[in-house]
Image (spheres, rainbow, N blue to C red):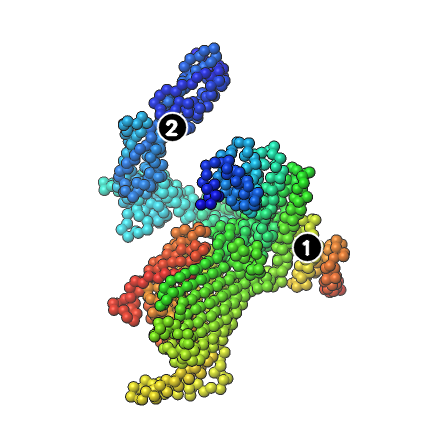
Amino acid sequence: QDLNYDNGKKYTLGSVSVLGNTSFNEQTIVAYSGLRKGKEITVPGEDISNAIKKLWNSKLFADIEIYIAKVENDVAHLQIRLSDLPILTEVKITGVKKGKVEGIINENKLKKGTKVTENLITTTKNFLVKKYKKTGFYNTKVNINTIEVKDSLEKARVKMVVAIDKGEKVKIKDINFEGNTALSDKMLRKAMKGTKKIKRIRLLKRSKFIDSAYQADLTNIVTKFAENGYRDARIISDSIVVNDDKTISLNIKVEEGKPYTFGDINFIGNSVYTDQQLNRMLRIKKGDTYNGVLLEKRIADNSKPDADDITNLYQNSGYLFSSINPVEVSADGNVIDMEIRITEGKAAHFNSVSVVGNDKTNDHVVYREIRTRPGQLYSKANVVRTVRELGQLGFFDAQEITPNFNNPNPNEGTIDMEYSVKETGSSQIELQGGYGGGGFIGTLGLSFNNFSIKDIFKKDAYKPIPMGDGQKLALRLQASRFYQTYSFSFSEPWLGGKRPVQFSTSISHTKQFLYDYTTGNADKSKSFNITGITLGLAKRLTVPDDYFTLSQAVSYQIYDLNNYNTGLFTFGDGSAKNLSYTVGLSRNNTRIDPIFPTGGSNFSITAKASIPYSLFDGVDYSDLKDERDAAEVVRDDTTRSTEDRTAAQDRIGEIDQKRYKWLEFYKINFKGDWYTELTKNLVLKPSMEFGYLGAYNNDRGVIPFERFFVGGDGLGSYSLDGREAIALRGYPNQSLSDQDGGSIYNKFSLELRYPITLKASAKIYALGFLEGGASFNSFRDYNPFEIKRSAGLGVRIFMPAFGLLGIDFGHGFDTIQGDTGTKHGWETHFIIGQQF
Amino acid sequence: CSDYQKLLKSESIADKFKAGDSLYQAGKYDKANKLFAQIVPNYKGKPQAEKLMYLYSSSFFKMKDYYVAGYQFERFVSSYPKSEKKEEAAFLSAKSYYMLSPVYTKDQKETRDAIEKMQEFINIYPNSEYVSEANKIVNELDFKLQQKAFAIAKQYRDIAPQYSKDFNAAIKSFDNFIFEFPGSSLREDAFFYKFDAAYQQAMNSVEYKKKARLEQAKEYYDAFRKSYATSKYVEDADKMASELDEELKVYSTKS
């Protein structure tokens, strides 16, 4: 029979039968093949091959063949012969640790029920060999066997045995170079990033041989030569020698060629910048060693978006459409003349600027932060900064803000800018109940970081709460039998909407009762109330640069004691009032993610002060001090009568009531954090802080309020007296200060952070820290080197609904009061919110 | 166990359909929807499916689940091209998108989608009884886009004097607005505010750019005056223009 594709014969399809070792229903196979009875087919032709293809694609069969069984009056009867592919019943993997077996099965999809094809076996084998070679097991051998299972079931089934022999990890004993004179072996070995020879002290890069890394390193060697002027350097040969002790040695033969130098460098096509200006950017002179890599970097450094290079010089001044190409015009001898050809194009202006994706946040909150406004000259730096600042708002996922350039028009010199944002949850709810402090404590905390106060009376806005104006609102209620705390705070970042002046206010009230020993209940007749209100304004400055913020606040607190006789104050009835003014200057240019900054720094200096009442209130405090000192002597003198001593104590109370009627003090705080990305993602954060609380009138003395308590997690949990809790891990809370707190403190810390994941749903990073700090009672005792030191590790998890949570394990190297050994040892800290 | 719970567990699809229908008519869309959802697969390809799918889609609409309603109505339209409810379904599909459109101060993706769908409806059914409502909706949605663009431009003007110093952003944005929405009812305001931004820029300008800016502001004033001679802003504008003239005198005497 003449089987020619072009003149196949037409038949009507008669019956189709199925032969072979298959457990599938005959009809199913026929239907699947698409060979319907009565269909007109051409043999030879597409119909048959399509049918085979279809069956083949089902991945259920092997050895598929279709025959014409017989032909009667143009009616063809077909026969399909095939056999089922065996099903995998069991996989056994030898030669690797048990823990890895599951991973290998998943990676290769060796699940029970998989059809075993030749292809599966080959790809699995190749995959495994490659996988282990990649990690340095250069001699890996993989053997895969299948064993047929024979039992009463008719289906073809096999067991698979994967035998992996990783062999020894191949280490590199030596790397030898030949032909290099200009660069030492050591320098060349250093240029090899992924191929290192055995060295006892190397911890980060172990010696192993990976072919792909080795090939890349050969290129690195050539690049290294090129960077030093040897533009023609090449590798003539390289060989791998297997040593007796299962190590290998690499022999690399290079040809250096001659060193080249830069000749004339001419700029062509520049009109916006002069040759001098461009040369200042290029910093390469005639006669310098030829270095193509450096030249490329000075023209366009792709590793840093805000690098000081010629491309950015143009990009930051509107020349979006500019392009810069270095061209070697002549290589006379070993001197290379360069021409840097610049096509400036037309300066681009922004036409429209838009934001998409702000489903919750209102336009005005976003647009006022944008630094690339319509009509402005294009500037890459402003785009980068806008992305950073939108991220810092905290309303959008900082990792997902993307600037899109639309409708570029080089003829008109216009471009449309679109910032695509993704809203992220910015509200936190805290609801807590538990036993502690002698009874039930309930806490309700709500904090909304993107609130809209103008919508609180709009029913439609409750989805679930009015949002989108960028205001912060926080409410916190805490109550137990012995105390109640209410606090409310609100802030609006752009008061009036015309400039970034942040208005903030907070009101708080705390009421606590003394414990009644007879009833075991709160004694309502003995109470201590603290009520406070703070109003603040913070303004972004433009001078010295626009990362600065100047803030001011006025706050007022009343401490009101009713028959509250404890050791806390020398008087049980009375009050103290604290009216103070705070002024602060801060600079924050941390970027990009506020949860995990990778660059920039954050400084703040604040001064808080009361009115110097003692200057004009006409009270002679030195007299009072003398009288108090005398009364103290009487009080502490056990030989005196009880009446005298009680009278003295009462007098001290009276004097103190006079001293603290209006709190008189000033306080200075300084804080600084720096963030540096050491390698990709690994961030170093040094920080230091300092605080000082002083008195205008030494006779009136430093107040027992507003003091510093160093040590522990720094969570201001029980703040009765305006105290500041300063975190210092590795020691218990507030353990590094006196019972009454210090009036001066300093702290230094060094933290290394590494992100585990920075997804919007949860950001997690690990950290290690070294820190030290101490508090002192006066300047006389102050010694910045006498600090309590600690080190430790921790982890932080940020989830939009819960805020920042974390745990730190700190080890204190110095002793504190109550320690018996030579050091304090381990402490565990739970962290809520952002303290460190 | 209530009758409704029994129904949910019942095997009879006919009972469910009947009960769902009567629940729907009684305004219990939530319950009806649950029953419909169970039987939708069973009715696939059957003649009753058309009515079922219509009721099912409507129940989403009534439940204010407009995302699903829009999609289901769209499916209804393509599945039953001969249905007498087709036109209504097409309209309700577009209307569902309209219901999803947020306030103009937020991202307007849904608004633009809704305009597109409504416009499509109007193009396909130009004689429909719903066309007048559809036109009303399109106008309403388009006005939202206008309000948005206008508010953004106006904010550029508001933050310029004390913060950004960038009056050009406002002028450019109002220009874009005037170009993009030629028939807008906010056009008059846009013309005035554009002039106002240029006026403020000129009056507070650095010396070497002042003359050009004064002249530019005057130009914007003329344009405003020409188009809106009877505007509510005329009095203010005239006053501002005379101040500009006053400043300009300095330059004419100098030269």
Label 1 is found on which chain of the structure? B
Instruction: Name the image quarter holding residue B210.
Output: bottom right
Q: Residue at x 64, y 42 (%)?
A: B119
Residue matched to label 1: B190
Depth check, mark 1 against mark 2: the one in front is 2
Q: Where is residue A324 in the image (x, y as percent from the top left)?
A: 53, 47
Left or right of A455 on screen, residue A441: left
Classify residue A95 as left or right of residue A747: left
Residue at the image position 33 percent from the left and 45 percent from the top: A195
- Residue type, label 1: Ala
Q: In this view, does A81 lie above or below A417?
A: above
Horizontal and vertical percent position of residue A640? 31, 89
Report the residue marked by disc 2. Answer: A60
Judge by depth and name the residue closer to the eye, A97 or A630. Answer: A630
The relative height of residue A539 versus residue A169 in the rendered view (above or below) is below
Which corner quadrant of the image does residue A793 belong to?
bottom left
Task: Name the chain letter of the residue that bears numbered label 2.
Answer: A
> A242 and A649: which one is in front?
A649
**Which quadrant would the C terminus of chain A be assigned to in this image?**
bottom left
Gap in angstroms between the C-alphas marked 1 and 2: 70 Å
Q: Which residue lies furthest to the top in this view?
A: A73
Secondary-structure class at tag 1: helix
